[in-house]
Amino acid sequence: AETEDLFAPQQLNRGANPAQLDALTPSTRFVTLGIGGNDVGFTEIVLSCLVAFRVGTPCQDRYVVGGVDEISTRIQDTRPRIDEVLDEIKDRSPDAKIFVVGYPSLVPESGWGCSQLPYAPADLPYLVARETELNQMLSEQAAAKGAVYVDTYTPSLGHDACASATRRWVEPVKPPLQAAPVHPNAKGMLHAALAVAAAIRANS
């Protein structure tokens, strides 16, 4: 989903999901929001940075042109959309506490990566930096609107898509189980839920 799918039905192969904001009422007490990655082009970035030979910096070569980082630009372009969503939540549920949920660690912060997530090792720090930038933007917008940012990145370190099948919270590009590529698996969603629950307890 992108931010626009919060305001209008999201068309899918098997029909349509209703606009997610329609779930809100004036009596809503808590709202959790996880959005922004698809506005930046998450799927496109994940797929276009894959390589057959893990050498050089093909991902950076694609997205940084003439000193301008296209992913960074997209992140900043998404900032006002997050503002719009948070404002709409406050309008529909003025007494609700809003929790903006960040993104978990997707790739290793250092090292050589792995064959199941074939990115050039020299591109890994770049991808980590862009995800960090996205989470930072979400944190800043949450703070500006009086919402609470929920950090799922820090607790997920070491549980990225290159971790072992028993340890990872995010699946690789070709997951062995029925799971979305480079998305949280059941363990990842459980730990995200625990982080959200802890944030709610701390702010209730």
Image (spheres, rainbow, N blue to C red):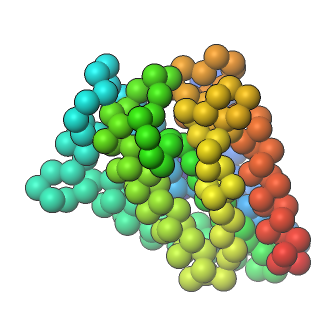
User: Which quarter of the rendering shows the N terminus?
Assistant: top right
Is the residue 178 above or below the residue 24 in the image?
A: above
- Side of 163 relative to 30 (left or right): left
Residue pictured at 69% horizontal, 74% vertical: 148
Residue pictured at 31% horizontal, 27% vertical: 54
Residue pictured at 46% horizontal, 22% vertical: 115
Seen from the viewer's position, the closer of residues 166 and 15 is 166
Seen from the viewer's position, the closer of residues 52 and 14 is 52
Estimate the x, y position of residue 17 in percent, counting from the top left.
68, 40
Estimate the x, y position of residue 125 in percent, counting from the top left.
38, 50
Residue pictured at 54% horizontal, 20% vertical: 174
Disc tally is 0
Regarding residue 16, the answer to whether it shows in the image is no
Question: In the orientation shown, which residue stands out farthest toward the left?
Answer: 66
Asked which quadrant contains residue 93, the reply is bottom right
Estimate the x, y position of residue 96 in percent, counting from the top left.
80, 75
Asked which quadrant contains residue 172, the reply is top right
Regarding residue 50, the answer to whether it shows in the image is yes
Seen from the viewer's position, the closer of residues 121 and 27 is 121
User: Which quarter of the rendering shows the C terminus?
Assistant: bottom right
Estimate the x, y position of residue 11 in percent, counting from the top left.
58, 35
Question: In the orientation shown, which residue stands out farthest toward the top?
Answer: 176
